[in-house]
Amino acid sequence: MLIRRLSWKWVVLCALAAALLIWLVTSQVSGHVFDWGVALGSFRHLSWSWVFLSLVPIFGTYYGRALRWAVFLKPLKPHPSITGLLSATILGFTAITLFGRPGEFVRPYLIARKEGVPVTSQFAAWAIERLFDLLMALLVFAFALTRVESSGMRVGAGLSWVLEVGGKVVFLACGLVLVILVSLRHFADPVRRRVLSALSHLPEKRFHKIERLVDAVVEGVRSTRSDGAMLAVFGYSVVEWVLICACYWCLAQAFHGLVDLSLVDVLILMGFVSFGSIVQIPGVGGGMQVVSVLVLTELFGIRVELASSFALFLWFLTFVAIVPVGLFTGLKEGLDWHSLRRIGREASSQ
């Protein structure tokens, strides 16, 4: 009964998302009448074997994330359960797709409960993971910028702002991320001492509560102090983005003849999409679908109808495809739609 209720809700949700994508795209293309026949006809010419093959690398990213999180856990638990980490990762990304930002906290919350470690330590690990993902996204975007500038591609108004400030943003953001990672690596204990010293005047009960919280955060970042752990985390981050690139490339092969992209083109698309997901582009906003369409139309001269179809598949593969797996995993663990929502709310209020 639960699966049946969720199924029709997801059909409606995906239909609304597709309609919203078309509206956003057509609102950006003045004077262009959207040809639904071309958009729907592209589905008939797809190579569906490549579409299904693209699921392999994107699902592989969740396993890679579980392995990377095991590195974060080692100071607290030397031998964490990879199966448990994979399950929490799948449920966490399902929650993000279903509930948006509150779903971000489901994964660290579940991992903390499964592994018997402080929740705050896993929130700290989540923050470090986000820093590494941000660093990789910025590096891919930097590559995209250099390729676009060296090739002399003509960029429309929707993306001209990105080229104007993109290089500065990449430089400053990469520097900030590296400073934070170095600070976590070398100054966690001194910061802990200074914070606790500054709060020593508090009542004993409240001070001990804050002390436990600070200690849990310090434990969560302890994995960054080992050279081997840092290299492992960076290595897993690289593998993750290689797998994401493989997913994009497989989808490009599925659209071959409709949307012809080389491997370098795929990397450029990845770079701009990753940047657009981080920064709200003026006059366009955020959202990987809109950025994908703008890049495909303005940089590669692809028809807006075909670009919209490609962007819709890209969104489905990278966000929605995990949802059925996550719901099935949740049911196996005694969780459902409402349980995940409750966990997300509880975790975000921690």
Image (cartoon, rainbow, N blue to C red):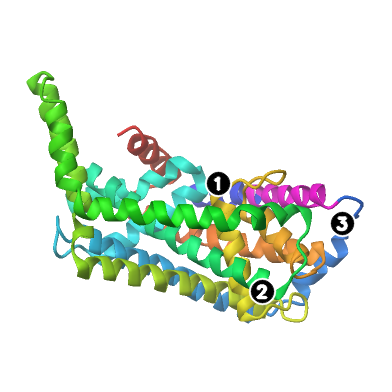
Judging by the rendered image, the residue that carries numbered circle 1 is 5
> Is label 3 in a helix, a strand or a loop?
loop
Q: Which residues are magenta?
A: 12-29
What crowding class fits label 2: few (fewer than 14 Cα within 10 Å), some (14-19), or many (20 or more)?
A: few
Residue named by callout 3: 34
SS for tag 1? helix
Q: Quadrant of residue 288?
A: bottom right
Residue drawn at the location 38% of the way across and 54% of the way down: 177
Mark 2 or mark 3, earlier in chain: 3
Q: In which image quadrant can residue 35 be found?
A: bottom right
Prevailing SS of the magenta stretch? helix
The mark that comes first in sequence, 3 or 1, is 1
Q: Position of residue 46 (x, y in %)?
A: 72, 76
**In which quadrant is the C terminus drawn?**
top left
Q: Which residue carries the number 2 mark?
A: 150
Amino acid under disc 1: Arg
Q: Is residue 327 visible?
A: no
Distance from the alpha carbon under mark 2 to that under mark 1 = 52 Å
What residue appears at the point 51 percent right and 57 percent down from the top-left corner? 170
